[in-house]
Image (tube, rainbow, N blue to C red):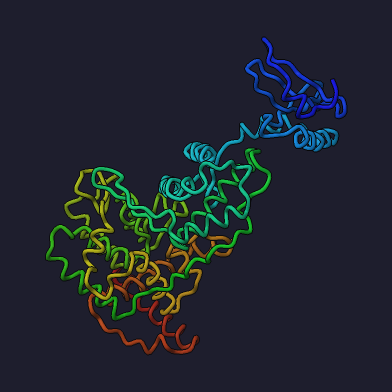
Amino acid sequence: MARLTKRIVDAVAARGADYFLWDDELPGFGLRVFRSGKRSYLVQYRAAGRTRRYTIGLHGVWTPETARREARVLLGRIAQGENPSEQRRLDHQAITVKELCDLYLQDADKGLILGKARRPKKLSTLTIDRSRIRRHIIPLLGTRRVKDIASSDVSRFVRDVTAGRTKANVKTKMRGRAIVRGGAGTAARAVGLLGGIFTYAIEQGIIERNPAHGVRKQADRVKDRRLTEGEYRELGALLRIARKNDALGTSLAAIRFLALTGCRRSEIVGLKWIEVDVENSCLRLEDSKEGASVRPIGLPVLNMTDDLSEGEQGERGTFVFPGTIEGKPLVGFPKYWKKVLKGTTLEGITPHVLRHSFASIANDLGFTEATVASLLGHSRRTVTSRYIHTVDTALIMAADTIAGYINGLLDGVHFARTSYALDRPAREAALSRLFSEVVADVEALAA
C-alpha cells in the first residue's frame, strides 16, 4: 500500500468484514475500514509483548494529513515507553469526585477515616460531612474525574461557594428544611473536607498529589464575642421571665447549666445522669469532642443537679435534660434558645458564646490558661498539662469560684471588681484569700 491520501481514502469500498490499509511512509499508521463503510485512522504498536491499536479519529473529522501528524506524535511517545491505548483505558475507568466521596463515606462509616486525635470520626461529624458533600462538593465537582482536578479547580470551588453559587432552600422531610447560604466560612470548611477526601484518594493510590494543598481560603473569623456583666444580668432576667412558660422549663435549666459549666451545647443536651459524679464534683462525659472527658463543676451546678434529679430519680441511662419522648434527650434546643432571646439585645448570640464567656470570666478572675483549658475540656497536648489536670482540688475550687461568680451575675448581683483590676501580685493575694475562705467553708461543712 502506498502513502494514504484523501483520494485513496475516499475511494476505498466497504467489504463483508473490517479491514486495514497501512501507510508505507509511516510504519504503524493506518486506516480501518468498517463493513458499514465508516473509516477511522489509527496507529498500531507493540507494548508489554502485545499488539495494541489506538484510534485517532474518524475520516471526515480528521484528514489523512492531520491524522498522520497526530500519528507521528503518538509513535514518538510510544518510542519513549508510553502506552496511549492503556492510558485511554485507564482514563475511561477513572472515578469521578462523586464516586470518590462515596468510597470515602463508606470507609468513614466503618471507622477507617481518622479525625481529631487520630480517632474515627464521630457520627455527628460524619453527618456534617455528608451535608457538605451533598450540598457543595457534588454540585460543583461531582461529575469531574478526580485525576483531572487541578488546584485552579479547587480555587474556583472556593470562590463559587463563597459567592453563594450552591445556596439552596429545599424540603428534607415531613417538617424539615435545609437552608444553604454559602459564604466564606462555609467555603473554608468545605474545602478543608475536600482536601481530606483528596488525601484519602492519595492513600488509595487514585492520585499522586493533593490539588487542595496551597489553595488560599479566607481565615476563620476569630470568635471573640463574650457576655459583659450587664448582659449576664440581662440573661438572668430573661430566664426568670421565661419561667412563666412551662414548656420552656427544661430548656431554661439547660441554658443556666451551660452558663455555669462552660460546656458545649451537645455535651449538655445529651448529658446523662450516669455522667454526673456528685461525690467528686465533676461531669464524666463519655463522649465529647475530645473523647471521654472529665469536667470539674462548682457548687451552684451541684445544687442544680439536686433540683433536677427530683422526680427523675437520677436513674442510670436517663438524661439530665429529658425530652418529651421517654428515654430521649431534649430536642429542639436551638428553637427554644431563640425563643427566650427573641426581641432582646442578646438575640444574635449563640449558645457557644456562654462557653467563651465562661473562659473569659475565668481569665478575668486570674486563673491560668492551663486551668481554664482543663475546666473547658480542651485536649491536652503536653505532659505538663496532663499533670495539671490531676490537681482535682484546685480545679474544683476554680470551678466553684467561676460558677459562683456567674451564678451571682445571673441572679442580678453587682460585684465589686476592684480586686480583679489590681496588678498580678495583688490579684494572686486576693485569690489566695478567696481559696482560703473556700477551704475553710469546706472544712466547716465536713465538721
Between 432 and 336, the one lying in front of the other is 336
Query: Picture coordinates of residue 299 (x, y %)?
Result: 30, 67
**70 versus 45 height, above or below:** below
**368 versus 19 height, above or below:** below
Q: Residue at x 63, y 44 (%)?
A: 148
Left/right of residue 127 with respect to residue 63 in the rendered view: left
Extreme-right residue of the structure = 25
Query: Picture coordinates of residue 32 (x, y %)?
Result: 72, 21
- Tell me the quarter of the picture where residue 436 sits: bottom left
Q: Residue at x 26, y 59 (%)?
A: 305
Res 82 visible: no
- Tell me the quarter of the picture where residue 91 sits: top right
Between 410 and 116, the one lying in front of the other is 116
Query: Picture coordinates of residue 384 (x, y %)?
Result: 58, 64
Between 159 and 277, the one lying in front of the other is 159
Extreme-top residue of the structure = 16
Q: Residue at x 32, y 67 (%)?
A: 259
Left/right of residue 324 with respect to residue 299 in the rendered view: left
**286 versus 87 height, above or below:** below
Q: Quadrant of the N terminus?
A: top right
Q: Quadrant of the C terminus?
A: bottom left
Left/right of residue 89 with respect to residue 324 in the rendered view: right
Query: Picture coordinates of residue 335 (x, y %)?
Result: 25, 58
Q: Residue at x 60, y 59 (%)?
A: 215
- Tell me the quarter of the picture where residue 248 sits: bottom left
